[in-house]
Image (cartoon, rainbow, N blue to C red):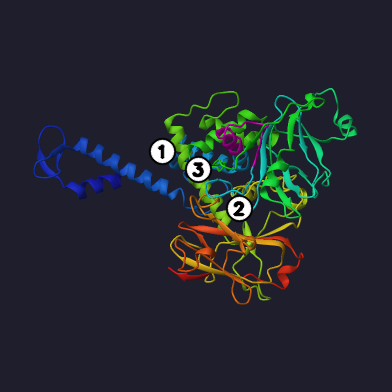
Amino acid sequence: MVCYTWRLVTWLVGVDRSSQGEGLLYKLNENVIMPSRLLLRSVVSSVVIGSLTSLSVSAKELPEAKRFDQTDGVLERARAIEDIEYQMMVQRATQTAIYFMPAVGMVDFIKATRRIGGDLNDVVYLNEPLGSDDGFLTANDVTAYCWASLSSEAGALVVEVPAASEKVSYFGTIVNAWDQPIEDVGPSGRDKGKGGKYVLLPPNYEGKKSKEDLEKEGYFVYETDTYQYGFSFRPRLYEGASDQDAGNYAKGVKIYPLAQADSPPATKHIDATQKSYDCLPYYNFTYFEDINDVVQGNPVRVQDKAMTSLLKDLGIEKGKPFAPSEKQKRAMHEGLLLAYASMQDFFVADGKACVPLWKDKSGKLKSQWLVWDFAAGQAEAGFPYETEESILVDDRAGGSYFWITYLPKYLGGGTFYLTGLRDSEGAMYDAQSSYKLNVPKDTPAKDFWSVIVYSMETKSFIRDVERVGLSSRDADTMQVNDDGSYDIYFGPKAPEGKESNWIPTGEDFFLLFRLYGPESKDFHKTWMLGDLEKIQK
């Protein structure tokens, strides 16, 4: 290194052989002359720094493995790394953001309910479906939902679900703070449509009555590992029932402490129909505020201890206030971007979250439409996203809770989902282009079909648009083709004369095409939905 540096110095500046005091003088230009020792020190520093920079770059290069005991210059390469503390913060922000994704989604329901004047253990309901001013991960626009966020921190909790009526019943799930299903309700759930009282026992429950005692009294009892929970119930309507009927039915849902079951206090029901309800996760500083809320509001489970311990570097620690430094905030901001990018890639990449439904015998695509491809065994296990060997971190984040919530305990056949990401040419849907989808007359949905546009960025409805979707329920207002099919248009502007069949976009988007009540489990063997055709760039 020294010999190389000396040659470099000579080459760069040349030598002035005139002696003026100590040592040689080196001429940098016509006006600047520097003593040799100072120049040498300066140039050597520059060279060494440059060399260390090269080492930093070369750290990404895999050295050739020749011996088991080679060091590969690890000490020197390590010394080239700058601000190790910050870089570790960034890495921990990325990994914890992905790990806590399902729990963040649940906390955002709590925060959204509080923004409209409610709180934990209050029931929120609708008298009409959600619209473009609401923020939900891939919710539908045809259902007057009922939902709540819950806590058993003060003691065991009862969720009372009404029996199915002649007009309305529920399909839905109670989940824990990590969005893991606890139980399904309604005709396809535990109560089989007869209604029931679901008891959530907090961790380390020590009540007067045991689980067995409570079950003998007719309760459906569940031992849980978190304090916080949520539920989302989707009404099924019969005999010409309306969304208003669904809203009235929601008032039969009750939440109260088990200790007051003999004389339960009234449940607060909040009509959110005319309110903007936004429970989306946002990938900014509030994301880590959400993670802190998860940590503070629940016990730290055994399986989460390792990841929770990494949060200390970001200022998140159980029982302590969250007051991160500017450096920690910068690291969270940077790390969260990579987390989002990773989950987004899992969502859109071929063969990860979704796989093609229609292929020919040679494996060639017949259609671009996709179906959800959950991790092996998870549907059968009730979507815990945990096995005896591991936690399926990426599958439950990018593969599910990055874009959906409230998976059922038992996967049934009530609704079939097709996911659309690409047009007939295989290109991702984009904000500027316009497209057409032909929905055949014989679409095999006993109840109805629906197609909804979602923002690719937020995985929710596109904001402030005339409509977010269309369905066969809109047959009276849509234009129908001579063969009984419907042409649905997507784009920033409606084609002239096709406004009734148009769903606005204006930003990069994806689609969910739902078949409510598919006619058979094998319907896709005799029927296929065509791709979106680009009609204008």
Query: In percent of the image, x 47 and y 64: which residue is there?
Result: 494
Residue 356 x, y percent position in the rendering: 64, 65
Question: Would you place residue 403 above or below residue 366 in this image?
Answer: above
Query: In percent of the image, x 62 and y 74: which residue is there?
Result: 364
Of labels 1 and 3, the one closer to you: 3
Q: Residues within 10 Å of mark 3 (few under 14, many from 20)?
A: some
What label sits on residue 82 in the rendered view? 1
Residue nearer the viewer, 388 or 116: 116
Residue 422 x, y percent position in the rendering: 54, 65
Among the 4 quarters of the image, the one containing residue 56 = top left
Residue nearer the viewer, 518 or 352: 518
Marks 1 and 2, the one that precedes in the sequence: 1
Q: CA distance from mark 2 to mark 3?
A: 24 Å
Residue 169 x, y percent position in the rendering: 76, 48
Residue nearer the viewer, 177 or 270: 270
Query: Viewed as shown, does residue 35 lie left or right of 288?
Result: left
What label sits on residue 449 in the rendered view? none
Q: CA distance from mark 1 to mark 2?
A: 50 Å
Residue hosting label 2: 141
Q: Residues within 10 Å of mark 1 (few under 14, many from 20)?
A: few
**Image quarter (top left, top right, bottom left or bottom right) of the N terminus:** top left
Tell me the amino acid under the disc marked 3.
Tyr
Tell me the amino acid under the disc marked 1.
Glu
Among the 4 quarters of the image, the one containing residue 527 = bottom right
Tell me the magenta residue range. 107-125
Question: Would you place residue 170 above or below residue 361 in this image?
Answer: above
Q: CA distance from mark 1 to mark 3?
A: 26 Å
